Image (cartoon, rainbow, N blue to C red):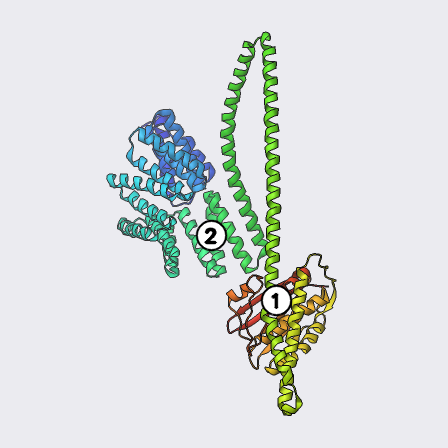
Amino acid sequence: MRHSPKQLYLVILCLFYLSIFLNINAQSYLPNEIAKIIRLASRDSAGIHQLNTLSELLADKNADQSLQLAKKALEIGSATYQVQGKGIALNNISIAYYRKGDFTNAFDFGIQALKWNESIDYCPQIAIAYKNIGAVYHSQANYTLAINFLKKALDIQIYLNDKKEIGRSLNNLASCALRDSNPDLATKYIRNAITHNKALQDPYQLALTYRTAGDIADYKNQIDSVEFFYQSSLLMAKKANSAFLQETNLYRLAKLSYQKKAFEPALSYLTEALSLSKQLGATSETAEIYQLESKVLEAVGDYKKALYAQKEFGRLSGLMFQEKKCSQLAKLEAEMGADLKQEQINSLQSERELSILNENKYTVLSFCLVMLVIAVLIMLFVIWRKEKLNRLINKELNEQKKSLEEILLLKDKIFSIISHDLRGPIASLSAVLPMLEPESLDYESYAALKNNLVKQVKSLNLTLENLLIWARTQMKGKTLPDKKPVLLRELVERNMDIVMSMAEQKKIRLINEVAENCIALADIHHIDIIIRNLLLNAVKFTNQSGFVLAKATQDSTNIFLTITDNGIGMSKTQVDLLFQLKTHFTTQGTKNEKGTGLGLLVCSEYAQANDCILKIESEPGEGTIISLILPKA
């Protein structure tokens, strides 16, 4: 029996497609295999059906190959007026672009698919078009529109009793509701999706559903449930042989491991996810994986690989941006080209219509227009100058107002301190001094009273010194600091000697652990005043038998001097008030020692003058750490 060449061709084609579908578990095909499929595709409904079916099967495995097949199906469908095949191909192209992360083209072809399928009243593909458009809106964080399109898709699928697509739409709605910060609605949809898809026993649908359930659990911070759902989704994705779902679950598991600081599992997940995303041709997913991989590698100290991953992320991000811009520019150029051609035609026609007799008319008109423009420009210039002058005047007035307010505030501050903190001790001294008659007191009472008076005089002297120093720094024309190398250990030791008597009364240990080689570049008088005030405050607010520790560390450019005490500490609110002139914040020490609240203001202003940084860390009941960061000599 002899066979015609046409019959032999059909047999070979059937065997070829049979080999394709028998190997459907492969993640993708070699480029020459896809080229052969496209070349051998028959230009009829059977050929379009085969191309569309294979495109759908490869959508989650290799988006580039899926796109090639769908475009060929569209070409044949358009040429042979296969209207339904064309509608399916448009949706498949939209899906392929979505998998590639090209959301602009995914949206454009989704709209084309919707219009075409509505024109032929092809309900199943109308629903898929709604779903695809909803997915793009979801990716662009427009969740309101995404939910609207997905609900339209679900209504059609329920009408058609398309159980597979119903399960997918329920899952997509749950994902959108979650992204829209509505976890309760998302939980409602996902429960329905799990029940529905378990009944279908479809591993692909279950993989989608479990992945969304994991996202919801992650939003609710249910860590154990998150890992369970992602692992379950990964298992179902492998059963369904979906590279896309495997990649997205591996990325989520890697992110979860990174958050748990389990870096080795995170790297393992990312390596596998990266291989799959490259195979899919998914640029946006590959960029996300590289970004997370750079963070994990940095965390484990592999900075070279981390830098490479970060560079790849930047390259892919720039590529996606450039592709989008190129697409937009191409459209604009086409539109502008058409407009330019029309303008040139109109210009040539106008030139032919113009007469030499009208030259004078246009010359006069042009002159009038120029004069009008000049007049308008002059007017605008005058208005601009006037507004600029008003702004300068207002600025100067505001500065003067601010300066006057600061002067009045300074005046009120000084009078407040003098009346409140100096008048009292002076009045007390005036009352006690007449009592210092040796005949009216025994020796012990005399000595105790004398010591107290000495202490009050010293305190009053320190208050006056701080007040005068601080007031001098507020005056205009203040001198710049005289910066020279300063031996910090000697300076700390000298000031500890000054406050030693005050510390001994409270049995406070003064510890100087500043190294000999700590040499700062600053004004020695300014730093001396800062250290003395910091030590006095530390002793003042430290309880009986406490300690005050001075310590310093250094790097190549700075010295970090810290004064630590185990005193009563301060709240964050109290710390925030310390350097504010308006508050006049001061409290009594652990033995009711009084202060003016000026010491730290003086410290702050001298620190700024010497390019130093003053920091305070304190907790109530835990003590205080004051750090002074000085430039190294």
The local secondary structure at tag 1 comes to: helix
Q: Would you call the spot at circle 2 few (<14 residues within 10 Å), some (14-19), or many (20 or more)?
A: some
Is the residue 545 above or below the residue 257 in the image?
below
Q: Quadrant of the C terminus?
A: bottom right
State which quadrant residue 415 falls in: bottom right
Q: Which residue is at a point 63% across and 78% down the rendered structure image?
A: 430
Find residue 89 and name its label: none
- Which element type, helix, strand or loop, lies under badge 2? helix
Q: Earlier in the sequence, mark 1 or mark 2?
A: 2
Of residue 141 and residue 368, the one placed in the foreground of this image is 368
Determine whether, in the image, residue 170 is placed left or right of residue 446: left
Q: Position of residue 10 (x, y in %)?
A: 35, 30
Residue 600 circle label: 1
The answer for how far apart the CA atoms under marks 1 and 2 are is 58 Å
> Which of 554/162 is in front?
554
* Left-right relation of 595 to 185: right
The answer to whether the residues at label 1 and label 2 have Cβ atoms under 8 Å apart is: no
Q: Check the picture and name the quadrant holding the N terminus.
A: top left
Q: Is residue 208 above or below residue 155?
A: below
Decide which of 336, 418 is in the foreground and name it: 418
